[in-house]
Image: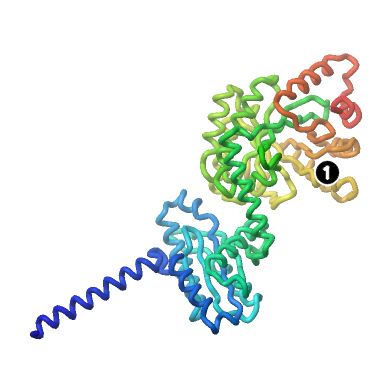
Amino acid sequence: MDSQILAELESLRQHKQRLERDVERLLTIDQLTGLLNRNAFTNRTNKLLNQPEVEKTQAAMIEFSIVGLPRISGSLGRHATDYLLSALAARMALMLAEGLLAARLDYKSFAVFLPAIVDPLYALTEARRILTKLREPVDWVDRKLSVDVMAGVALATANERHAEVLLENASLACRSAGQRGGPGYAFFNPALAENTRRRAEIQSAIQDGIEHNYFFMHYQPIFDCANGNLTGFEALLRLNHPKLGAISPAEFIPAAESSGQIGKLGSFALVTATRAASQWPADTVIAVNVSPEQFLDGSLITDIHNALELSTIPAYRLEIEITESTMMADVEVILPQIQALRELGCAVVLDDFGTGYSSLSYLWKFPFTKLKIDRSFVQAADTQPKVRGLISAIMDLSRNLGLKVTAEGIETPVQAAMIQACGCNFIQGYLTGRPVPDTDVAAIVMKRFAEAIRPQQTDIMLPGSLARRTAM
């Protein structure tokens, strides 16, 4: 065999090796970040977990979840998020010691495997160290891209040393860190698995509710503190599942937000509430709560236009209630939508004032028409004189800014008297009326109308006469 043939064979062999390396890279490496992909990561992690020298040591899995990518993709395009993820991956890879494995698990998640750790505190320290670095802004063109990051840590036990199980546990811990707030990281514990099972049940119940009409609305009356007149109702979404029974909004709202189902629920609430309000007197308003996710996905203004058109009620009869956490989601995205709501004629109410960030800048930067004092303030005022002073200060501040104030959670005549003495405009709570289905609203309206036209009922002041007249 001459030298030319040998050279050609060697060239073919080298070409085959390059192809095999390319195929291996495609099968094991995430093409965007250069990190291991999920499949290769779990395979290598399992090999490490089964090595004799590692079996006798502690090991840990850390998952990092990037929060806020859809917002960046929606405003700047997918290329911006790709650049951000590549930068974060490179940043993380530079921080890892030799022998540690790192991977991109999916669109928004990374993972790091620590095959031999001294103690659990070391794994937590590593999670915090990487988390801090990943949260630093990334320079892109003429701006900085900022995202939040959550971390979950799972430890390998003597009985459970499988990569997929560790990843699942770290993911559960990561979700827990995001749900409870605080530093943004958490250890896995068995209770998380039960919480996740319940959350999955709730998400399934939400889907059932959407498909089979298990959702419905209740309406709680709101009264004028000065004269006791009925001014409107707050619409409250309810879910009664045939298997799970009544499910609290405190459970199904967060589950719907995290699973992307909140848009459908928000649209249902707006259409149902405004349709109900179209049957009420023309001077009654309907207040509907909206989620930050409805602002961020860009559907809210369209949903409100649709609800008003279907119900034919004027926009000034619709109050949109938002929480302080809504503004923290993304001011640049949310402020223009609030301004659009005001231009449309809707009122915008700052709900649960005092329980969140309570930045006074919100009150003058955002075109609110009203704020609601959270029930926790009202209840605390029963025993804490300082809280009463704080409520009075909120009333004074609101008057100076031209804002009306509603106090919610009023349950006793003493609370009602205190709120009226502070100069509150509107009152809402069990004392004056519990939430009722749409079929019972007409009775409340007729009762108010009948009492309003009685000559002897002209002194309608809180708390006495209003409390007596609204007892149900």
**Residue 411 x/y as whole percent:** 85, 38
Q: How is the image coloured?
A: rainbow
Residue 358 vs 429, above or below: the answer is below
Residue 386 vs 13, above or below: the answer is above
Please give left or right for residue 113 compared with residue 189 in the image.
left
Which of 164 and 422 lies nearest the eye of the viewer? Answer: 164
**Residue 77 x/y as whole percent:** 42, 52
Q: How many marks?
A: 1
Residue found at the very far left of the displayed protein: 2
**Among the 4 quarters of the image, the one containing residue 242:** top right
Which of 290 and 362 lies nearest the eye of the viewer? Answer: 290
Instruction: Report if residue 348 is visible in the image.
Output: no
Residue 228 vs 446, above or below: the answer is below
Residue at position x 48%, y 71% from top? 102
**Among the 4 quarters of the image, the one containing residue 228:** top right
Task: Give the residue at mark 1.
Answer: 378
Which of 28 and 267 lies nearest the eye of the viewer? Answer: 28
Q: SS class of the residue under badge 1?
A: helix
**Among the 4 quarters of the image, the one containing residue 121:** bottom right
Residue 350 vs 34, above or below: the answer is above
Quadrant (top left, top right, bottom left, bottom right) of the C terminus: top right
Instruction: Report if residue 198 is visible in the image.
Output: yes
**Residue 437 x/y as whole percent:** 72, 28
**Residue 348 x/y as whole percent:** 65, 37
Q: Three-letter amino acid code at disc 1? A: Val
Q: Residues within 10 Å of mark 1 (few under 14, many from 20)?
A: many
Quadrant (top left, top right, bottom left, bottom right) of the N terminus: bottom left
